[in-house]
Image (tube, rainbow, N blue to C red):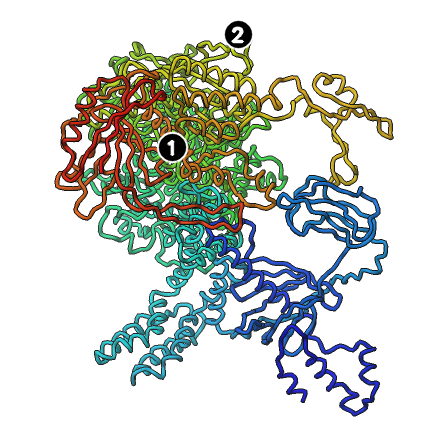
Amino acid sequence: MVVALRDVRVRGEIHTIIDYAADMLQSPEFVNNKIHTGWLDSRIAANVKAERPPWHLSVIGAAAVRAHEASACKAAEYLGYLSKGQLPPPDISLVYFQDDLVIDDIKYHVKVIRRGPFTFNVSVNNTAVDVVARKLGDGGFLLQVDGESHVLHTEEEAMGTRLVMDTLSCIIAKEADPSRLVALSPGKLVRQLIKDGEHVEQGQVFAEVEVMKMMMPLLCPAAGVIHFQVTEGAALSAGELIARMDLDDPSKVKRAEQFNGELPPLGPPQVYSDRVDHRFTQALNAAKMIMAGYNYPVDDILEELVSCLDHPALPLLQWHQEFSFVESRMPPGLAAKLEAVTAEHEQALGGSTADRSNTEFPGRQLIGIIKGAVEAAPENEQAMLQQQLEPLARVAKAHSRGPEEYARSIVQEVLSMFAGVEEKFQSSSGLTTEQEMIDALRKSYPNDHQAVLDLVISHQGLNHKMELVKRILSTLVLPNPVPYRALLRRFAALSSKATAEVALRAQQLLEVSLLADLRAVVARALSGLDMFAEADGKLSPTVSANVGSIFSPQPSGDQAGAAAAAGTLTGMLGGSTVVPRKATVREGVFSGLNSLMAPRSVSPHRHSSTGGAITPAVEHKIETLVAAPAAVEEALASLIVDNQDKYLALQYRALVTYVKRIYYPFLLCEPQVNQHGSMLAASWMFDDPRTAETSAKRQNVGAFLVLTSLKELSKGLQVVAAAISSLASQAGVHPSGSILHVAVCNGSDALAVSDGAAKLLATGGPLLGCEAEESFSSVELITSSGPRSPTATPKQITQVVAAAVKDASSLLKAMKVGTVSVLAAAALMPVRNGFVWDMEEQAYKFEPYLRQVEAPVARLLELDKLASQQAVYTPSRNRQWHMYHCTERKDQRSPALRRTFLRGLVRQLGSPAFLAAMYSMAADKVASAAVDELESALINCLEELTRPAPDHQGVTGRSDWVHIFHSVLPQLSLQGVDEGRVAGALRSACAALVAKHNTLFRTAGVAVWEMRFRVPGGAWRLLVSCPTGHEAGEEHVEVYKEVLADDGVTIIYSLPSESGVTPAAPTALSGKPVLQPYQSLEALQQKRLAARRHNTTYCYDFPSVFENALRGAWAARAAAGEPQSIPPPGRLVEAHELVLTGAEQRFESTNLKLTRVQRGPGLNDVGMVAWHMTLKTPECQQGRQVIAIANDITHQSGAFGPREDALFRAAGELALEERLPLVYLAANSGARVGMATEVRECLQLAWVSEDDPSKGLKYMYLSEDNYNCLSSSVKAELQVTSSGERHWVVTDVIGQEDGLGVENLSGSAAIGTLFCRAWREGFTITLVSGRTVGIGAYLARLGRRCVQRTDQPIILTGYNALNKVLGRQVYTSQMQLGGPRVMGENGVSHYVVNDDLEGVKVILRWLSYCPPQLGAEPPLLPTNDPVDRPVGYAPAAHEKLDPRAAITGREGGEAGLESGLFDKNSFTEAQAGWARTVVTGRARLGGIPVGVIAVETQTVVRVVPADPGMLDSSEQSIPQAGQVGMGVNLQHCSLHDSCVRAVAKASLSLLPCGIHALLVQQHAGSMCHNCQRWFLHVR
């Protein structure tokens, strides 16, 4: 009977007694037949309960079921949002859950983490267990825990939730705590009806809340003393604690006891096999689940995955797994063949451990057998057999290329999942917030919202995914990153801040792989075939062909250097000496190295004492490496420091090439290299790069010392001292200030130092000032941050080298060494440290800028000028350019402005145009060609500055201010020429280059571009100033010569004689030292950058924007071959600033006066600027006048105050008075409402409870002294505290400054009224350059035309304020409220543009249709499109009329272009996204401006977006039928009727057949001021 009862399953609203009856039947009394009539009553009285499930299973099962149901509910909610077209709230978590479970009066606080769709991790008090929960068809759940299965059902009851596990049940009780008063729904606490700490009765109303604009009372559930936890006016969320109660009778409330124990030890939910292939499958699935957004322990999963991939038996076990399924269905004999092959492999695996590691799975052989069996089968059975054998073929193919390739494919599969998801959540196409990106995904997957949900779940686990990705990159990719370049490029392109760390790591790995390839190229070029045939027999390939498994431990420094030197032996012995083109050409790493081939002419061999003969081919390759643009310095340095005991020729050639490259072109003699035991010593003469072209040039001595250990430094210095002294005496120069290079080869004792240096290290004190240096290159960063770091980190190497240099300071000082540079081997690339002799301190000091470059290069890059900046170094992608970043702040409150100094050397000038100019001996042509050849270098720099990549701090974003410096090394023949002519050529060529790439300059934030050209006797310098990003004229180019000052030492800027065109600031640098350190940014530039931080243009830069737009308009007209395309001479824009003068300067005044002033930009003291502009446009070459008004976003965020309102009103009235167009450039924060600064700084706060400020504010007050000083600025009441303190409680704030209160709203109303009047009586157009709020939004709407940028909103209030009002997070960005996707589709914005320049172009184009003054004749613009031409467009048979094609024409037909009704390229459409069944705009007909109204004849779909504030609203797509005809409106002002009729009749007579025309004339009314309007109806 008990068994039968256990099998009974009855579920319903009424609970059955099956479990109680079964327990009763098994009781000892019943079994022993000791029951009686009172036995059942005794059980009831004793509260005997039925058997319950084990407490831990109840807790785990309830937690898993609730998490499963919660995730399903949230997923359904999320999909509901997507299906309705709404943006889901960003705080919906689909992976993490927590809950409190009360079972048998014990409360368990559980946390649940989803490990997969059906797998959960349940934790209680830091003990966790994995469980699998799958929902059954009957509504129950199949629970797998600790290797056992249980069936769970849940039933809701009055006391809680009944959990039925198998046949046992328990109650998950509802926790009722009347001492906690919580909010049941979102709302706002309006007022507290009971004072804090007072007694309240049961059922008494203690507070009122506002929920959805309804007042609701809150009732107290029990009597007691109330203690409020939130203040009046606070926003409440559902479940938030409002107050606590001290109950009168706590005994009436039974609280559950908190569980503080732990879960018992439990195993996995399922019993898993310990076989390698099964463990690998589980680990791989777990890694994929992590990439899908779920949570697994990263370290354990990665360790298990690597362990399985490194196991040699993995392929065989996977094969056996698949073989067991298909063995019985194989043709006779095939199974035996396959088993014979695998048996042989299995026997090999059974051998010794050493043999097993080298045993490769016979995948290719198995594939051949399978392929042969399929081909040998009858033709009608081949397809079936192939399908049967497909699992075996898949395993064999996966392992056919070895374990490394299989492991690589697994890693790429996992990493591709990460890239595939996160690439969809990067800011692009105007999408800035995550919610907007999700909405874009919703539109991309209109019929598969589940795919969007899966992407969101994966993205929510970004932090966990990044941990796994970083570990994979450091553990599996770092040893051999070359095969992963495609993925690394995808990772490096991730631009969001959340993925910045992974992007940085990928960029570093990409650099490592590219530098390894470059090192191999350099090693191949320097080795040559002769290196294998030297007489001493010591020369052999530089590297070994063996490449270890990517899962093996990272090789040591010498092994890593050898592995990266030249690739495999086969690659080094290739027959061709031409460097092959790599897939990495896009990075420019091999720039200039594709010509490494032997020259035709043969020169005699040159020998050295150590390297043997240098053949002509190798000599040519050395010279190519010296002058190549590719950054080969690090590759050469790594070849020098590699332990080259057996390969001296390669080390010698690398040393010679390195010296010749870093001293190019100032080397006076070949380096003299000699071997002294295990050391190499070299010496040479060179010219000081700074004075080489001057009369004060100074020759100097350089030396190079190669050591095997730092402890030999003193001995090596004695050898070098003799070489320097000998060379200096031969040349007759003093060796003072010589440069010494030291290279320490890698080895076990490379960093061993002398006893003196060891004592210095032991002290731990400062060593030459290098202890604070933290700037390392990207390669050093990644090699020192991964889990497989070398024994010595770059910082440790620096400390050891500093100790060695300090210990040898006396010897170095005696040798007159001015600079010491030490190269030491590291894991991937050598670490460089530089030390400079300090005359003041008489000691060597660490120089941070010599960490990345050698001293001669640092002098050419003029890094001394960065001495005043605390710059952080970042190399470019191809390492040709050196970028130094620093930050500046105007004050503590101001945002940090990021400055970047990009510097680089141009080693080659050899374009055909330059060579032709050199042959012509024309100096001006040579100068112009030299500037033109810098274009490729300039573009490379600009692309480097604009590419989305993080810096070494893991911060994305571009610089605010950039200075580019190019030092051109080839000498130009410009001696004995007309300096004015050369300066003019340089200025003209540079201005043309800047104008060509003006957009890139502006995007990259380049403010200065500086160039230095070496010429005999000195150097020329060009400085292009682009502070606004819109400069492109010769007046912005300054040309200087370098000359010696009167002291004969200092080099200064000097203007060339007869310079021709006078630059804008000819004396800005004239007479100043060339090496003067860079100063902090001036106030004007800081304002520009502050405006740029707001993503807008500084107000004073808008005249330059108009100038740039007009240049583009004239250039476009010339390119199109239009008549009158030559712009007038001089400036195209003349802007005169207007300021208020006179006593009356309030917006209420009717006597506001404006005066033109000539003052510099940025001198305004009001947040509004106005100009009277004269624009020399193509239609008004003499100039047309407009009034322009702009907000100054840097002045109190561009807010509107009384003074701003007064200036705006005065400028608007001036425009109406002179009948001129009014242009408003909007970037503001609405009306200014704030508190007086002097009062705010002195205010003090009195809290309701000093011990608990969360209980709210009592009042704000001023002290006695502050009130005496501010009595005129405030109204206050005296209050004396219990302690006798006198508090002046502030009731009103007046302030000393006007314009802080409601008067600003009055001013806003005044200018709003003015704009309404201007709409009726004039012409207004608004450009939304920055965010425009409040009254700014009203003005944008009240204007005749509104041009909005894609990244700027038009809003009345912020989204945070709206969310607080709604009580939930509805809106996530300002763009969601007033972005172009809102305003462009509701008719507020007429045009949507990408930036301010494009917006100004739209303004100018629209003004071209308007008369210069209201009521005047419209401007006629001659065109090369004849008015009597036939209209080429005609709809084909069964083709609907395309109104836009009829207006503008279209591509197609036999002629290539079917012309439209109007002049070519003259149509400008307005409000394209609104009322799409009508096409409106402006065009020209015979040069006459006309208005165009056409109807859309095809069906269009109107999309009505869902209202985020209404949860029930959905996105609607409403088809709208096309209209019946097309109308063309010809508008003109004060023209002769006969002329208009002639034009109209001419166009009518040329309409295509089948289209009837009707010409109707009517008066336009008073709005057009006596003009006439012509309507042309085409049906």
Q: Quadrant of residue 106?
A: bottom right
> In this rendering, which labeled residue sits more in front, label 1 or label 2?
1
Q: Amino acid at mark 1?
A: His
Q: Work out whether 65 lies above or below 597.
A: below
Horizontally, is 90 left or right of 971 in the view?
A: right
CA separation in Å, label 1 and label 2: 38 Å
Q: Earlier in the sequence, mark 1 or mark 2?
A: 2
Mark 1 secondary-structure assignment: loop
- Outermost residue, left side: 1454
Residue 512: percent from the left, percent from the top? 41, 47
Q: Is residue 884 visible?
A: yes
Q: Nearer the viewer, residue 257 or 675?
A: 257
Assign the C terminus to one quadrant of the image: top left
Q: Position of residue 1571 (x, y in %)?
A: 30, 19
Most foreground residue, 500 or 1492:
1492
Label of residue 1142 in the image: 2
Q: Amino acid at mark 2?
A: Gly
Q: Nearer the viewer, residue 425 or 638?
A: 425
Residue 3 falls left or right of residue 468: right
Residue 418 point in image, percent of width and height: 45, 54
